[in-house]
Image: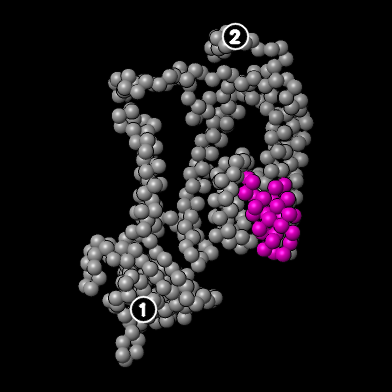
Amino acid sequence: MKKTNRWLRKLVGRERPAGEEEEEDIDLPGQTRTSQQTPPPHGRSEELHPSPVPPEPEPRIVPQDRMLDFSWKLGTVIIVAFFLSFTAVMVLRGLIAENNLLFSFFANMYLAGTIIFGGGPVVIPLLSEYVVAEGWVSARDFLIGLAIQQSFPGPNFNFAVYLGALTAANAGHSSALGALLGFLGIFAPGLITVHGTMGIWSAVRGLRWVKSLLRGINAAAVGLIYTAVYRLWQVGFVDEGYEQGTSLALEPWMVVITATSYVGGYCDFYTPFTMRFDLLLPLGIALAPIVAAQDSLKIDIVNRLSCAKKTKVGDNIAVNYNGTLTDGTPFDSSYSEDGSSPFTFPLGIGMVIRGWDLGLLDMCVGEQRILTIGPGLAYGNEAVGPIPAGSTLVFETELMEIIEEEEASDE
């Protein structure tokens, strides 16, 4: 390695100035060195698509005037002081959290910032757990803020400022104060521990077990990122009229587009030029609105009600309905000249069309909804009775009853 570094300095005509310290390289998973690359197993593929081999990166050099002049003793003091402050915040969180929302929010941000810092997407499910699950911010507002935040540069920790302002405003406090508490709570642990670690790092960075520990942390970060993506996937779909998110897996074409995008990215990285799918992801994004129309579900709530018990998957429910095509042609109804005969079925287990399984969730007894269901969530390209193939269906529905289990078993 020393020979390689000397060769690189000679190549670029640069010698290391006196007073500068060279950082020791630590090979982590995901860092690729050209000298260790294996030739592709596809024969002459590189001749078809030649690409310059990137040079080995120049070793990172830290100027002396930019190094933190911390001794390992001072670093240890900083780390110990931080853990004492963390313990104090967590103890107070348990004692006064119910009576002081702003301190409880600050404590949750302090905890999130301690568990992981760096600004990546890993922090998003933690923020959801510590803010949305507490009832301070709705899932809809959380996802809207996340979408807005992705449009701006900077770490995802900036999102904590938005959540702090919204949490404080919803509770009748100053939004500026909430934003400040979010900023301090999420950033303070990282800033303190980094300064403390820099003092200790110079004394321990040459130890083999420390290098192994860093590799393990890097591997664990991959799992945390997967967890973040999966948690967002589970709550990433919020339909009109709802405050809570549901899984994107309920939208079949979202599953298809996501899967093909991942496969396309894998193929693009591991296959030669003649087998690459460079346009797969952009094409999937462009086609998403078109194919999604087939699986569309529009819910118009006629009379929004509040209740303690709402419909959920597995409930036996009784529903009155009128079914028409988009041109107003009726094809089915639970109403007759003799009155109504509500249709009874278990919700969410595939006993009815998928548009009903999705469109009648989170509904109160007496609530009325108009469901406009695309063919992908109805009968598709199959003609059923008076319903032509590929039809979009419109249902006027009213929830009459959520049948208790004992009642359902008697029937």
- Image spot of residue 114 (x, y percent): 66, 44
**Placement of 16 over or under 94, stated as above or below:** above
- Image spot of residue 406 (x, y percent): 40, 80
The crowd level at tag 2 (other Cα within 10 Å; few <14, some 14-19, many 20+) is: few
Q: In this view, does 72 lie to the left or right of 299?
A: right
> Is residue 230 part of the magenta span, yes or no?
no
Name which residue lies at 48% across and 44% down: 226
Closer to the chain start, of discs 1 and 2, is: 2
How far separated are the C-alphas under marks 1 and 2?
81 Å
Position of the C terminus by quadrant: bottom left
**Placement of 82 over or under 409, stated as above or below:** above
Name which residue lies at 54% across and 76% down: 306
- Image spot of residue 130 (x, y percent): 61, 55
What residue would you read off at disc 2? Answer: 13
The crowd level at tag 1 (other Cα within 10 Å; few <14, some 14-19, many 20+) is: many
> Is residue 183 part of the magenta span, yes or no?
yes
Choose between 201 and 307: the one closer to the eye: 307
- Res 153 quadrant in image: top right
Q: Is residue 284 left or right of residue 176?
A: left
Name which residue lies at 53% across and 25% down: 27
Q: Is mark 2 on a helix, strand or loop?
A: loop
What residue would you read off at disc 1? Answer: 321
Name which residue lies at 58% across and 27% down: 211
The colour scheme is one colour
Magenta span: 157-185
Judge whether residue 130 can be spotted in this image: yes
Q: What residue type is labelled 1?
A: Tyr
Numbered badge on residue 397: none
Q: What residue type is labelled 2?
A: Gly
Judge whether residue 98 can be spotted in this image: no
Furthest-front residue in this view: 327
Position of the N terminus by quadrant: top right
